[in-house]
Image (cartoon, rainbow, N blue to C red):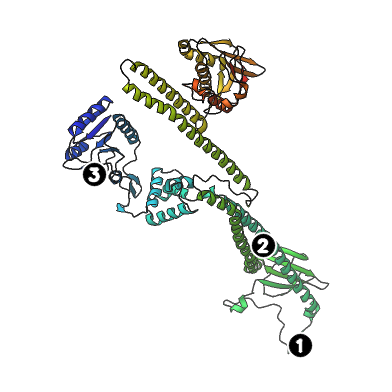
Amino acid sequence: MKVLLAEDDLMLGRSMERGLRLAGFSLDWTQDGPQTQAALREQTYAVLLLDIGLPGLDGLQLLQWLRSEDRPVPVLVVSARDAVSDRVAGLNLGADDYLTKPFDLDELVARVHALARRGSGRAQPELQFGRLTMRPLRREALLDNQPVTLAAREYDLLLALMENPGTVLSREQLESRLYGWQEEVASNAVEVHVHHLRRKLGGGLDQERAGRGLQAGRRGMNSIRQRLLFWQITALVVTSVLVSAFTYHLAWQAFNRVRDFGMEQIAHSVVRHGVRPHSWALDPPEHAAPRPTARPAPQDNPPPWVTDDLGRFISQIWSTDAELLYASVEGIGPPLQEPGFHNVEWSGEAWRVYTLVDDEEIVQIAKTASDRASSFAQMAPWLLVPVAVLVLLLGLLIRVAVNRALAPLEALGQDIRRRDEKDLQAIATDGLPEEVAPLGQALNQLLERVSRLLTRQRQMLADAAHELNTPLAAVKLQAQLTRRAPPGEREAALDELDQGIARSTHLVAQLLQMARLEADGRERQPVPLRLDQLAADVVAAFSARAEARGIDLGLDRREAATVLADPQDLRVLLDNLVDNALRHTPPGSRVDLHVEQAEGRAQLSVNDNGPGIAEADRQRVLERFVRLNPQNEATGSGLGLAIVAQIAQQNGGLLTLASSPPGGLSVRVAFSALPTT
């Protein structure tokens, strides 16, 4: 990995060069601004270490040039200027990190490695999408190579979409990109920004491609409100369409019946008031004008009042011998039909015909079907107006009802958003609807658990601070005494200092173990575990220490036993049990481990023949920082059995303290056993 060091101080530059080469970097070293600029033009570097006070061209000017050229090399500013304003200026000009002098070499190497890792996945200096170009390093957006003025959040929204082309981003993803945790977010904030982007960019984005990402700004079907509105209004519209179709069908049937009844009444009226057939046989007087038998045939250009009904309504009178005696239009009319109503095709058109048979004549009335349909079409829209009005009114009422029904959720969300991180009081659930109350109760249970966890952590921190004061004060005092001790006593003073350091180290290690258990941040992975094999490993690990103290440590009973537990947790549990036994058992004692399985339970026991613990103190000793004999426990912390109890509980085990057969303490942990293969 090649690094460019731009540093004008000779002594510091040599030291940094040597340290970085020892860390495995290849390195070029420049001592002024123009030389650094030339090196960046000619070579490609993984990281640039840049001092601000370079001669010729200072570091800030060089950094500004570097970003204006869209060169993506990561930059670590290394400078003695440690004011906040200097650090802010460097970072705003495009620096990726800022390290103040003096610094530790290990920290410098770690920061260079971190920048190199980030540089491998660095954002592209330019993003192109159709006619739109974005330059993230300069925070510029160009449409057809012309700058586009965007607000900060509009720019961030567009950058998120451009970095994920063809990917649908959820509304929550965009909100997390645009807003901080403590910021109030309006329900339609993302939609507003998307609308502004569309207005400012116009046709700059290919709608077919960019639309997929921009659609993510909409709330979609991820909103309960929109789901309710969608399904309720959809059901309303579908129901309205079905009702309208059914109403239309019924109205059409009724309209046809009314029109048929009208044709029937006309036919009966002709029969009641018409001229009988025998009257047609009488000779008219000589002075009388001949009686027309039919309306004259249509003229070539008849007036409108003639053509309104001409040829669309026909009345006919037939003799009982099926001879046409009269027609309202001469030479026109459907053929004679059987009595009753008929649908007839005549002269290329559909007709509705009614035939009435009398004793002396037959009356037939015909009306075109298209004329009937046209008349109904003029009337039908007025039948649908009430349905349309009803749909609009019900749609508005549904929206109001949904908003009112979801108001408790909105109020609950606002209540939670208004709280700071210290407010863990329960949420009021008295006024919540039955469907929302379980959510409020679940949140209250979560808040209660978090509150208990924070209380335990605060208590643990307070206890830890108190417990650490003593060994740290002892270490400090022992160090001062060692410094002042005469040569003959210095060895003993160093031994005491070693004991103080050992006690502090042991306490810190157990505090870290307890902190990990309290935070419960690690995801446990229970697996089938051979308890007897784990016990054998722990005995082997502590055998040298037990031998040094003159304690007989062994595994005197070992039955094959398999349990389901987290391997790391059980190793910590066993380590603490054996460590605790070795610390509190005098030299020449015996510590035995037993592993046995019976009746579906696997039990691990650690027995010693030491002083033991009185039955009245066995429950109290499981609490944190409890030491029964502080004056005799120079290296004890009071956390060992507390850690064991916590691990046993988290892995489904049962911890008991009892007297061992030799008269000491027996610590037993029982787990549910699995079949041993």
- Which residue corresponds to the image point at 54% horizontal and 39% vertical from the top-left? 450
Query: Which mark is on residue 248?
Result: 2
Which amino acid type corresponds to the residue marked 1 in the rendered image? Pro
Report the residue marked by disc 3. Answer: 60
In front of the other: 298 or 465: 465
Residue 498 in picture, x, y percent from top left: 39, 20
Give the mark toward the camera: 3 or 2.
3
Q: CA distance from mark 3 to mark 1?
A: 127 Å
The residue where tag 1 is placed is: 285
User: Quarter-wise, where is residue 94 in the image?
Assistant: top left
Within 10 Å of the Cα at label 1, are there few (<14), some (14-19), or many (20+) other Cα atoms?
A: few
Q: Which numbered disc flags the more N-terminal residue, 3 or 1?
A: 3
Q: Tag 3, which secondary structure?
A: helix
Q: Vertical placement of 114 versus 441: above or below?
A: above
Q: Quadrant of the C terminus?
A: top right
In the picture shown, does residue 480 fall above or below 79? above
